[in-house]
Image: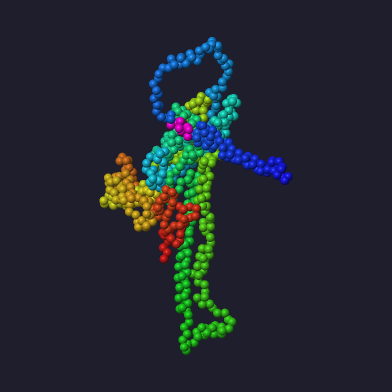
Amino acid sequence: MDKKSGNFFEQNIEKIVLAVFAVISLYILFTQAVLSPHKIEFNGRKVQPSQIDRLIVEKADELEQKLAEKPKPKEPYQSRVNDFLAKMNSSLNGINTDIPLPIPAPGKINSLKDRLYNLPKIAAPEDVVANNIRAVAYLPTEEVTGDLPYDEPRSKPGDLDLVTVQASIDVKGLYQSFYESFVTNVAKTEWSDPCLAIPVFAAVQLERQELGSNGQWSDWQIIPRPIIESSREVRDVIENTADLPATGIKVRMLKYNNSSVRSKILQPQAYKIASQNEEWYPPQLHAKYLSYIEDIKKQERMQAMVEQKRLKDEEREKKRTERTAGRQEKTQPVEKSGTPDMGMGMDMMMGGGGGGAPQLPSRTQQPDRSTKKRERNQTTSERKNPLLEKELPQLTEIDDEFEDILLTEDTKPEKLETILFWANDDTVEPHKSYRYRIKVGLFNPVAGTGQVAQADEDMDKKIILWSDYSDVTGMVSIPDVLYFFPRDIQEAAKTVTVQVSRYTMGYWYSQDFIVGPGEIIGEVRPYEPTEEELQAIQDDSLPETVDYDTGVMMVDIAQVTEWAGNRNLAERRYIDMLYSSDGSNIERLPTKANYWPDELREKSNEIKKLEKEPKEPLRSWQGERSAPGYKQVPGFEGINEFDPMMMGPMMPMGPPRK
């Protein structure tokens, strides 16, 4: 009775408190999670802060497209003076217009054009190095544009020589230089502008010199971006404000201050490599890659030698066992009836008498020389080879190091000490030598504003602030792809047998041609693969034809007599083949390998060695590798580990297994 007659609030206090807390929780959930107080209003709509940059870029692109459109004709002008005067008269009717209007007092307005900045100085790139790779790559069959990017449907395998020039830039010093120019080292405090102190990369410029036939270097030439480059921001380098679109420098800097554009400028895409035995890395890592490949090949050869030796030892042991068994059968005593035991007689003659006197061991019981040699070989083979003991690093370690230097969406340049960047040159030609230098450019944030100090006033209209040039790289020599070797001569017919060797689709091919005076050495011939190649390669990795045409004409033959020797001179005679490459200058080469120049002889031996390498199918666009007779090394599918059960390309190193 007392509880029912009590106060309502006292009876329901728990429920009231729970209801209040529920209302407060719902309010917090709705305002903080659903409505999101952190949203920012932009262009009439509320968006997340992370979307602001993207929306600004989209708005800038939209404005740029509108500005690029043709102007729409306006309506013809009609005078409305009378309407205006009528409205003015009606609005001012009855108002005293003689009252003077108040004018604001004159004051000093701080104009942005009054600001003057000393532009930052950009240090030269350091640690510059260049290298060349030769491989089969997927080359574009159509012009690459923003709408038609570099991809598989518009590409086909072809030979490629690619030079990559790598350098590093001091990012920490770069940020410090910009900060000092636009924030700390300013004439007046109000001129300080941290927004101008953010470096934005604009371009990388690669230049090269070519070594002429006279031994002199040519003038420096700017190298265009590779033909696989599809980014308009990277290809279209604008240096003067007069060439800027109507959107101006600010919008352009906003577009370039993006992780994807930054990576395309500083770390451009490389060609898709199709060769099994090559991979693209920047020069710093490519040297490690080549060292890794060489160690793998040495280990393969060593494993093959160990396997061959094991097979020979097994065969030798089998034959030795058979010989020993045969000797034991021949020395086994034959028991005949009525025949005294010669063994017992000998024992009696030697005074053995069947007692404890020592017996001389038989030949079959004595360790022969072959047994001792076998034991020595077994001991030697049990010794571990240092190369086989060595644990080679997986290729994934090189890939991990490569990923560490790549610029990604998560990379914060302001937190880096240095940035590794590179540029590619796909315009090099065989049998030529080059050297390079490189520089990097950043946007001038006050270009065209008249805010450049007098010391840098010549840079007022310059959009890009270039760094100093890097040091000049060492000479990069591109190997030739075509050689010819005079090998034999038929003096009566005045003809010479010339071997022409051509590098195509990643391998060397050679063919003999018999040429006489006035004939061109070499021609295009169809390639006929061997049965082994047809079984191993099922795709278009092999060429249909090989172009052996040298463009060189044989002129004549000439006998040469000369004296040679270090101490004792001796006369030697041989015949030279006279030839001409341009129709005016005549050159000569001996028709026997013994008299060739050392460089030509070494190249001939090198080509012979390379021709023996087994041909492998090309990798797909996705990088898939395959090669019969091999199994894959964990961590790198392209390097083939020797499989003794297959004995594929290792067969030339020893007799086949039976």
Which residue is the extreme one toward the bottom? 338
Which residue is the extreme one toward the right? 2
* Residue 374 in the figure: left or right of residue 144: right
Magenta region:
58-65
**Residue 39 sits in quarter:** top right
Q: Is residue 62 magenta?
A: yes
Q: Quadrant of the C terminus?
A: bottom left
Residue at image location 52% in from the left, 46% down from the top? 401
Which residue is the extreme one toward the left? 493
Residue at image location 33% in from the left, 54% down from the top? 528
Residue at image location 43% in from the left, 47% down from the top? 273
Tally of marks: 0
**Residue 614 sits in quarter:** bottom left
Kindly tell me whether residue 76 is visible in this rendering: yes
How was the colour assigned to the protein in this rendering? rainbow
As rendered, which of 435 and 260 lies closer to the eye? 260
Kindly tell me whether residue 215 is visible in this rendering: no
Majority secondary structure in the magenta region:
helix
Which residue is the extreme one toward the front? 1
